[in-house]
């Protein structure tokens, strides 16, 4: 069984981003910052059609939701 590859990244955010993340966590939309950031990255990758986060199926589902 192959181990999942993970890498720890560090970033610095301006106050506006930190406050927005705080709001998402405080309102219970996300339980942790890292989950909110991962979700935002997934959306970014889908928008730019980067695999495996994007597929024709995802595109069709998103069109139906509009």
Image (cartoon, grey):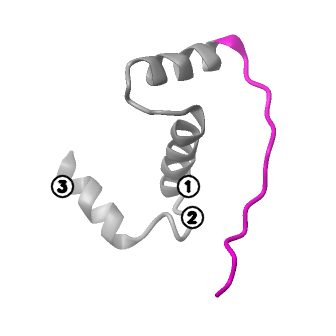
Q: Quadrant of the N terminus?
A: bottom right
**Spatial CA span between label 3 and label 1:** 20 Å
How would you rate the neighbour count of disc 2 (Cα within 10 Å): few for under 14, some for 14-19, many for 20 or more?
few
Residue placed at 48% from the left, 48% from the top?
43
Q: Earlier in the sequence, mark 3 or mark 1?
A: 1
**Closest to the observer, 16 or 9:** 9
**Closest to the observer, 64 or 12:** 12
- Number of the label disc, if any, that sits on residue 64: 3
Residue placed at 55% from the left, 70% from the top?
51
Label 1 secondary element: helix
Number of numbered tags placed on the structure image: 3
Label 2 secondary element: loop
Is residue 10 rendered to the left or right of residue 15?
Answer: right
Residue 19 x, y percent position in the rendering: 58, 13
**Spatial CA span between label 3 and label 2:** 21 Å
Vertically, is 34 above or below 19?
below
Vertically, is 60 above or below 39?
below
Q: Which residue is mark 1?
A: 45
Q: Earlier in the sequence, mark 1 or mark 2?
A: 1
Does the magenta portion include 8? yes
Residue 23 x, y percent position in the rendering: 47, 16
Q: Quadrant of the C terminus?
A: top left
Q: Are marks 1 and 2 in contact (CB under 8 Å)?
A: yes
Part of the protein shown in magenta: 1-15
Q: Earlier in the sequence, mark 3 or mark 2?
A: 2
Determine the image quadrant of residue 60.
bottom left
Q: Which residue is mark 2?
A: 50
Is residue 18 rendered to the left or right of residue 24?
Answer: right
How would you rate the neighbour count of disc 3 (Cα within 10 Å): few for under 14, some for 14-19, many for 20 or more?
few
Residue 11 x, y percent position in the rendering: 79, 34
């Amino acid at each position: 069984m192959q181990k999942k590859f993970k890498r720890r990244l560090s970033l610095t955010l301006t106050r506006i981003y930190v406050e927005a993340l705080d709001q998402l966590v405080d309102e219970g939309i996300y339980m942790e910052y890292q989950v909110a950031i991962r979700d935002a990255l997934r959306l970014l990758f889908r928008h730019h059609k980067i695999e495996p986060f994007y597929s024709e199926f995802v595109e069709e589902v998103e069109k139906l939701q509009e």
